[in-house]
């Protein structure tokens, strides 16, 4: 009688790596024709239906861009749902207050974006444009230039502060890289 061979999983030390005896996990692919990315973002096939498409992130974003959440609702219902959405998602607006929300592409902080807004610049402005806008804006709202304007002394201190925020960020970027 032939003796069955022993497995390598008994005793100490283990002869195979941990988890090597596991079966392969199944990955659901994106439902978009021709896409081989994992489909881990469910999207409804129709309103009020439990059937779902499963897209990759790129195709889910494309699908949801055309989705009208309020389609088929009366005006009162539409306003109530919009109010409920605003209430339920208010935590995201609060997070922006603490500087947790960035510029969207992750290159600038919320403080930098506010400073750029104050100077009237786009998010991708280089430091030369920042310096020029700072000088122009400071000359425009300086209290000595507008002696009779009551708003000028209130607006002017924000201009150098915005420049300092952007200058410090530029120095950090140069130092890192």
Image (cartoon, helix red, strand yellow):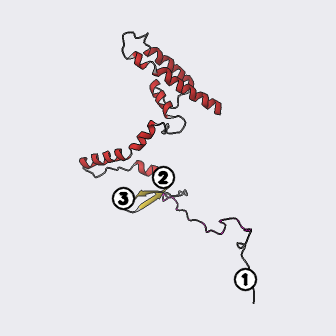
Magenta-colored span: 13-32
Mark 3–mark 1 distance (CA, rounded to whole Å): 56 Å
Q: Which residue matches tag 2?
A: 59
Q: As displayed, is residue 97 above or below residue 136?
A: below
Q: Is residue 3 left or right of residue 90?
A: right
Q: Position of residue 112 (x, y in %)?
A: 51, 30
- Position of the C terminus, as image quadrant, is top right
Per the image, is 88 magenta?
no
Residue at 61%, 27% (x, y): give it: 171
Q: Secondary structure at mark 3?
A: loop
Are there few (<14), some (14-19), or many (20+) residues within 10 Å of tag 3? few
Q: Report how many numbered discs are placed on residues in the image.
A: 3
Q: Secondary structure at mark 1?
A: loop
Q: Which residue matches tag 1?
A: 4
Q: As displayed, is residue 45 above or below residue 159?
A: below
Q: Quadrant of residue 5?
A: bottom right
Q: Tell me if label 2 and label 1 are in contact, CB under 8 Å.
A: no
Q: Which residue matches tag 3?
A: 46
Q: As displayed, is residue 173 above or below residue 12?
A: above
Image depth: mark 3 or mark 1 in front: 1
Mark 2–mark 1 distance (CA, rounded to whole Å): 52 Å
């Amino acid at each position: 009688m032939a003796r069955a061979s022993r497995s390598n999983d008994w005793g100490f030390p283990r002869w195979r790596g941990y988890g090597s005896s596991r079966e392969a996990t199944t990955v659901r692919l994106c439902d978009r024709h021709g896409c081989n990315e994992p489909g881990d973002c469910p999207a409804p096939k129709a309103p009020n239906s439990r059937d779902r498409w499963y897209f990759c992130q790129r195709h889910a974003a494309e699908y949801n861009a055309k989705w009208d959440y309020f389609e088929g609702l009366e005006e009162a219902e539409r306003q109530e749902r919009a109010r409920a959405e605003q209430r339920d998602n208010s935590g995201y607006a609060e997070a922006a207050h603490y500087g947790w929300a960035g510029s969207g592409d992750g290159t600038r902080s919320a403080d930098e974006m506010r400073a750029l807004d104050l100077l009237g610049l786009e998010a991708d402005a280089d430091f030369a444009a920042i310096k020029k806008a700072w000088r122009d804006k400071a000359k425009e709202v300086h209290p000595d230039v507008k002696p009779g304007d009551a708003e000028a002394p209130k607006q002017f201190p924000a201009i150098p502060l915005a420049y300092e925020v952007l200058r410090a960020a530029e120095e950090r970027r140069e130092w890192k890289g």
